[in-house]
Amino acid sequence: MKIITTPDPRLRQKSQKVRPGSEELKTTIAQMVKASLEWEKDHPHEISAAMAAPQLGINQRIIIIRDNLEDKNDTSFTALINPEVIKTEGKIITDYEGCLSVPLVYGLVPRPAKARIKAFLEDGAEVRIKATDSLARTLLHEIDHLDGTLFIDHIKDRTDAFFRLDDSGDLEPLDYDKHIKSNKDLFPDEA
Ligand SMILES: [Zn+2]
């Protein structure tokens, strides 16, 4: 299955809740893991940290999170079903985010430092997660996908907020006027 990218309208839909424990859910999760790892093969400087089902055009409330972000050889993910943000707290921290569905562009995105999440595991067990820092950021980014929100929507001052990876995998600033303002894929309503 192919990862869909902006401006595909399916990325902007609200996804439906799903019932944990079904065979169909198992298949969908397996497809998500496979697509994430295939993407990673084509992106040597990046790690596929997480994905939401709508990124495969499946409008269901399912996300997967990589279990170990330090080691690309560890390809295990945990799936969270119907995840909900119960509460966010802490300082607002601005840090880099990228998205498999927003090709080539990274952005500086403000998010709360802590998030409490409620979700179900694949088998139907309920879990509560107290996430901080990068895990909180990742979970909030993925849960946003389930409501049709992308990280670029959170960037209010766009002038110095966008970057791309150079050939050696370092982030370099993108000139707003040249690369972002006129990019109809990112901001179709404004061009
Ligand atoms: Zn994303």
Image (spheres, rainbow, N blue to C red):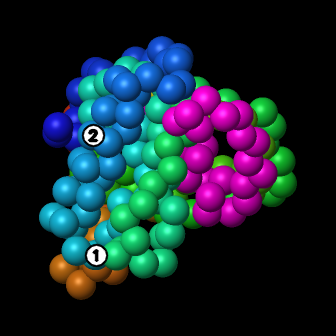
Residue furthest out toward the right: 90
Check disc 1 and give the amino acid type.
Answer: His
Left or right, residue 85 beside residue 33:
right
**Image quadrant assignment for residue 98:** bottom left
* Residue 36 percent location from the top left of the image: 29, 52
Span highlighted in magenta in the image: 121-145
Q: Residue at x 62, y 58 (%)?
A: 135
Q: Is residue 98 above or below residue 63?
A: below
Q: Is residue 27 left or right of residue 83?
A: left
Q: Earlier in the sequence, mark 2 or mark 1?
A: 2
Viewer-proximal residue among 4 and 119: 119
Image position of 17 (left or right of 89) = left
Q: Position of residue 74 (x, y in %)?
A: 40, 71
* Residue at which label 2 appears: 31
> Could you tell whether 7 is left or right of 146 in the image?
left
Residue in the foreground of this view, choosing between 89 and 70: 70
Quadrant that contains the C terminus: top left
184 or 19: nearer the viewer:
19
Mark count: 2
- x and y percent of residue 141 in the render? 53, 44
Query: Could you say whether the residue bearing mark 2 is in a helix, strand or loop?
Result: helix
* Residue 2 visible in the displayed image: yes
Please state, as top left, top right, bottom left or bottom right, where the N terminus lies in the image. top left
Q: Residues within 10 Å of mark 1 (few under 14, many from 20)?
A: few
User: Can the viewer see residue 188 in this picture?
Assistant: no
Give the residue at mark 1: 45
Going 36% across and 60% down the picture, which residue do you hit? 48
Where is 129 relative to 24, above or below?
below
Task: Estimate the x, y position of residue 5 in percent, counting from the top left.
Answer: 24, 38
Residue 24 among magenta residues: no
Label ID, residue 131: none
